[in-house]
Image (cartoon, coloured by chain):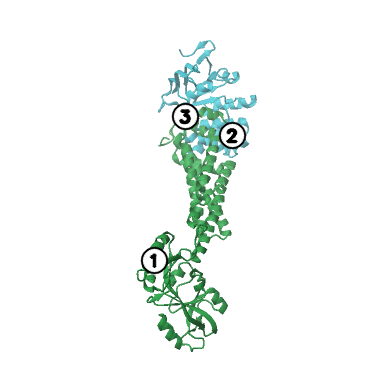
Amino acid sequence: MTAASGPRAGAGWPPREALREGATTAVAGRWISALLFLLVVLGTAVPAFADILDVNSTVSSEQKWVQSGGRVLVAEQREGSIPAAPCDALNRQDGVVGAAAITRQAIPLALTSAPEAQITLVTATPGIWNLLATAGLVRRPTAAPVAIVPATLAKRLGLRDGDLVQLIVGRPDAAPGDAEQAAGGTLGIELADTPIPIAVADTSLLGEALATGIILIATPTGQAQQCFVSLDASRVAAARASLGSVFAVDGRDAVVSDRLISGKFTTDYTAAYVSRPLKFGPFAAGAVIGLVWALVRWMRRSHDALYTTLGAGPGTRAIIRGTEWTVIAVLGGLASFALTVGLALARGVDGGIAAEYAARFIGSSLLVATAIIAFTLLMKPPSVLSALKDR
Amino acid sequence: MQLIATDLHYRYVRNLPDVLAGAQLEVPMGRTVAIAGPSGSGKTTLLALLGGLLRPREGQVRVEGARPETPAENVAWVLQTVNVLPDRSVLDNAALGAFGDGANLGSARERAREALGQVGLGPLIDRPIRTLSGGETQRVVIARALCSLRPFILADEPTGQLDRRTTDGVLESLLTDTHGKGVVIVTHDPTVASRCDRTLYLADGVLMDHLDETVGS
């Protein structure tokens, strides 16, 4: 393309007019433009929507698995107990989501509002908040002490999050206050003789044996029955190998096991995500769009030849066709994004997942298509003379 | 200023004889030249060489007195088949002829309106070009060539697909409205050729004033 300093024979197309010509062609293109627009919208929205449903399904399943104890290791001695302090200290380690030393107490627990209830008392070090909160199960308290009440128990007793309860620790017939003081001193828990607020939580992460008891926060000292450690996915294997020695007693490593039994039939969510069928969907969608564009361009080669006879060199023709594609790609991409996210939201997919994966899929598809189109624009065009005769 | 072709040789396939074998031509501005000859004699090939769409194997085409002298920058085309952008208006199609000379949209449209008026299509400028008849469309193509500042117009069978009455109208536009420009028309229609200032015949790869006389040698 020749730079134009002013109108004179053969001065060449001003770049601005080439841009305008491309945009006008896209808008005025009627059926061809509509076809390409629909191809961009449906060619990216349909597979993007399917991919989002797949990702959402994997994420939801993984989330449920994590909430029910996936990626949680339990360290304990076969006989005896483990030290509580190093367990709670794990909360300061990278890759540890939460860790708490937990003991199922033999002392019965009741409430003044339900003195006959036989409730299991569970004590846990403060790391229990990380253990439960990070999985989105319970909010952190603003003030201690707080009793964590399992959601199923709260429902049975008619309690709601934030209610005040007076605990009776010890014999059901013991007067409030006396027994608590005695038991608190033994268990390392801070008990008050006034009602305390409760946090209602899904504690199923701890397993059936512990998930039915009311949890009271204990100081991270002394001994505990088990150490529960929730980890980032990438740290599970290393922790499984090293945790035993952290809780060694008299030269005997602790036994470390997964909270949830896993085996060859256990779903590997990372693998499911990485190997999902539509992971490479953008390449296929982009290739189809790019090749259809190339086909349409071949069918309209007489138009390109016409531009050549009108003084449009290769650079000018690339600007015209590139602008035409850009207009269709941007409009089609936006429409596809809106359609994909709308469909995903209608199916109950999390908005963040829908927007992120729609943008990623559609953007990648259009980049692949653009690369193919750029390649076709660089290819040597057919003879102008023969193209002019091909109508 | 004149369009000069010197000793043009061209062949499509290496081992076949030349389609053009020493063709020579001079077209001054303001003159109309018809090139006649049987089908397959190389008329369109000669026109493509004159317009810079093909490069001669030997010989040269230049526009004496122009800067640059290369033909591609100095010719406008009126083609055998009706070559327009079908989804655009009459005005848009005509204005396309001006952009190659560096015109912006405003001046291109101004020139297009003037040219369309010259060929008698002033009232139709806002119509979609696909709604025009074949003859009207070909007159838009002539207006497109008039929009250009290029001094020469190359026309390849411009009336080849038109009936006699329409041919007369298109020919009138091409030969009269283009006053001042040099026009080369490839045609096999004797009526069209007879209305040009000069008629040349292409046979055996060379141009002749008559079928038995080589021109310009």
The C terminus of chain A: image quadrant:
top right
Q: Colour of chain A?
A: green
Residue A56, given in percent of the width and then of the height, sits at 53, 58
Query: Label 2: chain?
Result: B
The residue type indicated by label 2 comes to Leu
The residue lying toward the viewer, choosing from A4 and A38, is: A38
Which marked residue is nearer to the observer: mark 3 or mark 2? Answer: 3
Query: Label 3: chain?
Result: B
Residue in view at x 52 percent, y 56 percent: A55
- Which numbered dot is residue B121? 2
Q: Colour of chain B?
A: cyan
Q: Height in image: A341 above or below A252?
A: above
- The 10 Å Cα crowd at callout 1, few under 14, some 14 to 19, many 20 or more, is many
Which marked residue is nearer to the observer: mark 1 or mark 2? Answer: 1
Residue denoted by label 3: B150
Alpha carbons under labels 3 and 1: distance apart: 89 Å
Res. A28 image quadrant: top right
Q: Height in image: B29 above or below A191?
A: above
Which secondary structure lies at badge 2? loop
| Residue that lies at the very extreme toward the top in this rendered image | B212
Which secondary structure lies at badge 3? loop
Residue B206, given in percent of the width and then of the height, sits at 50, 15
Residue A383, given in percent of the width and then of the height, sits at 50, 28
Residue denoted by label 1: A244
Q: Are marks 3 and 2 in contact (CB under 8 Å)?
A: no
Which marked residue is nearer to the observer: mark 3 or mark 1? Answer: 1
The residue lying toward the viewer, choosing from A72 and A385, is: A72
Q: Are marks 1 and 2 in contact (CB under 8 Å)?
A: no
The residue type indicated by label 3 comes to Arg
Whether residue B102 is visible to the viewer of this picture, yes or no, is no
Q: Give the mark, 3 or 2, whose residue is nearer the N terminus.
A: 2
The residue lying toward the viewer, choosing from A388 and A92, is: A92
